[in-house]
Image (spheres, rainbow, N blue to C red):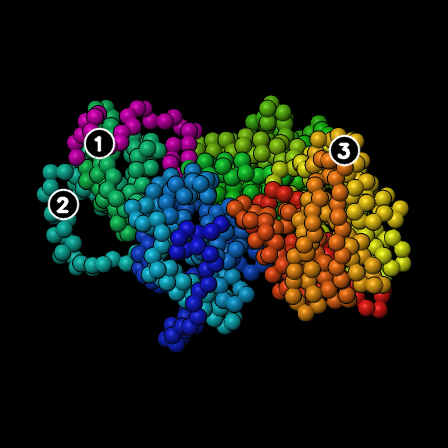
Amino acid sequence: MRSPGAASGSFVPPAGQGKDTRDSVASAAGSGAEPLDPLLLQAMREAGATVGGIYLLPPGEQVLRLTVLSGVPLEFVAPWERVSLAAPIPVADATRDRRLVWVGSHTDMANRYPRTALALPYPLALAAAPITTGATCWGALLLMWPGARPTRLTPEELNAISAACRRLGEFLRQAAESGHPVLPGPESHLLAQPRTRVVGPEEALAAADFVERLPEGGCSLDPDGRFSYVSATAAAMLGRDATDLLGELPWEALPWLKDPVYEDRYRSAMISRLPVSFTALNPPDQWLTFQLYPDATGVSVRIAPGDATGGRFRAPGPVAPSGVPTRAGALYHLVHLAAALTETVTVQDVVDLVADQIMPAFDAQGLTLLAVEGGRLQRIGQRGYGAEAVDHFEKISSLATLPVPAARALISGIPSFFASPEEMERVAPGIPELTGKAAWAFLPLISSGRPVGCCVLSYHRPHAFTDEERTVLTSLAGLIAQALDRARLYDAKHQLAHGLQEALLPHALPRIPGLKVAARYRPATRGMDIGGDFYDLIRLDDTTVAAVIGDVQGHNVTAAALMGQVRTAVRAYASAGAAPDEVLARTNRLLTDLDSGLLTSCLYVHLDLADHKVCLATAGHLPPILRHSDGRTEILDVKPGPLLGVDPDAEYPGVGASLPPGDLLALYTDGLIESPGTDLGDAAVDLATRLAWGRHEPVENLADILISHTRRADLHSDDIALLLLTPHAGGG
């Protein structure tokens, strides 16, 4: 995804760094994540960001971990404390693609990252940039700004981000080389913003006296949202002793503030850095207006008498009953995970998402995902268990005869929770010792009234499941069940469809003396329909060979069947000794008689390896590209005839060209070069350039390079077929 305006394109941190910085970084290496703190604060200060975070990618892992955060409570970023590199999230894109990701507004976020926008529904701007040194990517820097700013990064901001990533990369590189790499800890580190002013005891008392003299109540919330100061007037209005409130969250200490609307206003203030107000009812009849004034160190709150119509926001009504997830954080977290589950396609996608996002979201250390297969529970994924426990899970599968908690939960449809090893031992003796776990949640997966499987989350230590946790986990179980059911159906259809398609394509190409060949086929990654791209290589005699490539319109079983017929017809006419123009003409008449209603492009090439010549004819297919032995490339001008199956009397004139040893001929389908908004002619020129760049690569490596170049952040929606042909001297 390209960033708008000045922030578009690749992001490359600039070179060069002062000796003092190197020395200070090197001396701090190996002391944990805290040495990152000043680097993050410097990045935020120079870029003017109000929120900052550093994600690290541990060696050999595919999951980014939030290591240090500043500007908002850790709870705000709970859905993103651990991020899979494959996730459609800005920091993952920045790390995986090694580019700057700029999101200039919440609208931009909703269009490009809808899952993140749902869980972070506030006006904001965001930048994620890779932290790299050479070929190593250490992670990503995340910076956020309030939404009331220009939608494009300024050159000064770009330079600040670039410099910050360079400093971080050098620090992490030197720490690793010193033998003390900086690795993320078990929990993210919250970095408090430094105060711009430090006051003495007397001045602090004077400030408290000032607040106490005011007719309104006043209190202060620290960066975590907890009471750090409560005036006597405020305590009286809230109906609690000030000492009882210190260190508590308002929506936990005061039940009548437990409505998620109120916590959402606090979140909005912290992220937007703008004043926010709301009115709430302190039962039975006292209306209070809260005015929130945020900055980097917390929130100042002014409390005054109000009424039912006062304030910009109000949510009167009874406190939600126990068991209902009333925390705004829990609600947004659930929305985030629900949106993520809707994006899963395969069963492995579901397993990875539960393991990478739902496990850390609920602080679980173990996962077993079971699916119902023929009346038995089969393990389809697990994390956090040793080999012995995995073998045990493989044996425990009968729903009918084994009284294990997973089977019981699935049969009854009721989740079960075990908060300690003692509780589990009474139901399933030996499980705590076998698994090394101390708490479990067994979540039956029911979709449309049918049992689909069971999700088991487990913990290293005893874990008391709150009503809120149980409710959210039960809700997630229903979403996991739907995603798993849908994914299993997709996998079954996908396997059937592509099995059919592979049966219609050549399993292996013949070995031709004097000719090196590389062929690649990649099905579309969006959807599960069968494609119509095809290719073939046909040995005609000792020194001649035919190559063919084509594309049948459509992505369904009919297209695949017609593709098989076209390939068979071309092979038959070529083997009978027909010239290129006649091969296509006869195939065209056959398709016209079949009247399939589908159009087909096709390029046929006759190669004479003895005379080093080729003769080509095309039915509306993309022109081949010839790369000469000196690296020069040209797009061959082959006069195209009409697509096959249109005009029974169509002609397909052939054209000749030289193909001496060392030259390379590339045949391809449009999936290799086509992208939205790109002219096919320009795309073919770009492919020719890539062929020139790869002139020193073996033909097999070159084919892989060309295919991998087509991988984009979004999934490609068309099949790709590629055939590379290069004669060589000596034969064999």
- The span picked out in magenta is 304-331
The secondary structure that dominates the magenta segment is: loop
Mark 3, secondary structure of its residue: helix
Residue at the image position 25 percent from the left and 57 percent from the top: 195
Residue identified by numbered label 2 = 211
Residue at the image position 49 percent from the left and 63 percent from the top: 132
Q: x and y percent of residue 20 in the render?
A: 37, 75
Mark 1, secondary structure of its residue: loop
Q: Circle 3: is it few (<14), some (14-19), or many (20+) Cα within 10 Å?
A: some
Give the left or right position of residue 114, taking residue 501 as reference. left
Residue at the image position 81 percent from the left and 45 percent from the top: 582
Residue identified by numbered label 3 = 592
Between disc 2 and disc 3, the foreground one is 3
Residue at the image position 38 percent from the left and 39 percent from the top: 121
Give the left or right position of residue 712, taking residue 47 as reference. right
Between disc 1 and disc 2, the foreground one is 1
Q: Earlier in the sequence, mark 1 or mark 2?
A: 2
Give the left or right position of residue 615, taking residue 249 as reference. right
Q: Looking at the rendering, which quadrant does residue 411 occupy?
A: top right
Rounded to the nearest whole Å, what is the CA distance between mark 1 and mark 2? 22 Å
